[in-house]
Image: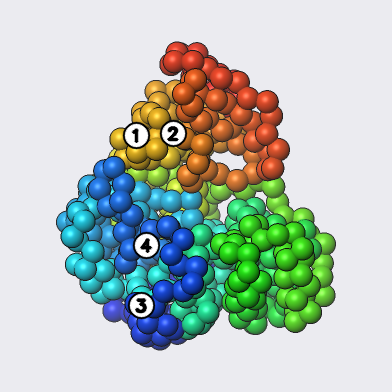
Amino acid sequence: MLAAMPDSAPSPLSAGGVSPRSGPSAGGVSPRAGGDACPGTLRLHRADDGALARVRIPGGVLHPDQADALRAAAERFGDGELHLTSRGNVQLRGLGTECGGELADLLTAAGFLPSAAHERARNIVASPLAGLDGSPSLGPWLAELDALVCGSADAATLSGRFLFALDDGRGDVDALGADVTLIAEGRSESALLRIGAADEVFRVPAAEAPRAALLAAEEFLRAARDSGAWRVKDLPDDVRTELARTIGSAAGPAVHRPRPRTATPPAPGPHGSAITAGVPLGRLAPAQWRLLTETARRYGGELRLTPWRGIVIPGPVPRPRAAEALRSLSAAGLITAPDSPWTGVGACIGHPGCAKSLSDVRAEAGAAVGPPGRLPVYWSGCERRCGHPHGEWIDVVVTPDGHRISHVRGERRDPPTTVRNDPAALAAAVAEARA
């Protein structure tokens, strides 16, 4: 299980005693850093609704005291809301342009910045139900990989887009297209290492898996030096092939294991002794965040933010208490059952928060909500599709001509349908596509 920490314990995100000064100095700039616009907590991004900070939360694991600190930051410096991302991180929006120093101090005190130089490189997603339903715990891997990343001078130059994934074997985060993925093989003494979306994986000793993941990322940086690629998928084909060959020569034997094409998030509701709630459009008001935090503090002392904009409270939550907790979360506007109209509905921030968006897609998504569909749907205000899902999904993009609706299957996209400025027709078309 991803370990819950007592109130007096150090944050799990600072595992290994990594000093905030480890790695290159925070003021150092890598040759590639100038073009990487991913926001962090030390370099804010300017948006139409104010500055934006993206707080990396490796594995999505939060102690309630850390959750309190995030809420305090949102209320003190921003619009008060907490926005979940497709990597299990948290964004603070509507920030004042002069709050950077105070925000950094608050987040450092809460354990979110164990290394200032690495704050944007700590992108790690993990199977959110790991250790809760008979699957292996990923806590030791998560703590060690985070410490290794923060202790590597090379890793400080990773793009804010580079992603590690820790999969407990069920394939949920393996399907997300991470750059380096570790896959547990039950409770055996071996693990699988995947580079990008390759169908070939390498078997490595489970005890050495986090170090193998870091070495793969450092090898990627050397391979990307000439191409300027930020992620494995951006490498030229021949360079990507050579990268796999180099990593394979140092790892164990190659195994054919195609990456899952569709990620399956935990369904909202009870999961054994844990409970899961979805967050409509990934946006949490302070009262909702406080309720989730208090529930976690009462039942297990941990929250796990999922890459599908949901939250798992590991518990153990006794069965009668689980029903009571889910009723409270539902009354607060969260998704607590798979048949909720909001299940599978996502959207980018849209207008007015983003200047590139052509419409208020969150309002449009809400107006079109109906019976839950078989496929998730994601609404984007422009062609960038920020935060879109992976695998199979319905893509709704606003264009100057209307809303373009496509069925996406991995790299394939069916011929689109365009609906022009008719909310009823748009809702009907989206419902039909999802079915």
Residue 171 placed where, x, y %? 66, 56
- Disc 1 element: loop
Task: Please give the residue where the numbered disc 4 appears in the rendered image.
Answer: 40
Give the mark nearest the N terminus, 2 or 1.
1
Q: Are marks 1 and 3 in contact (CB under 8 Å)?
A: no
Q: State the residue in front, 273 or 255.
A: 255
In the rendered view, tell whether residue 340 sits above or below residue 65: above
As measured in the structure, the alpha-carbon distance from the residue carrying label 2 to the one carrying label 3 is 34 Å
Contact? badges 2 and 3 (CB < 8 Å): no
Q: First in sequence, mark 1 or 3: give its number.
A: 3
Residue under the image location 50 percent in, 82 percent down: 152
Tell me the element at label 4.
loop
Q: Marks 1 and 2: in contact by CB < 8 Å?
A: yes
Query: Where is residue 175 shown, x and y percent of the image?
Result: 64, 53
Disc 2 vs disc 4: Cβ atoms closer than 8 Å? no
Residue named by callout 3: 26
Q: Is residue 269 visible?
A: no
Residue highlighted by disc 2: 381
The residue nearer to you, when weighing 121 against 89, is 121
Between 212 and 310, the residue placed more toward the observer is 212
Q: What secondary structure is found at the residue carrying circle 3?
A: loop
Q: What residue is pinned by disc 1?
A: 351
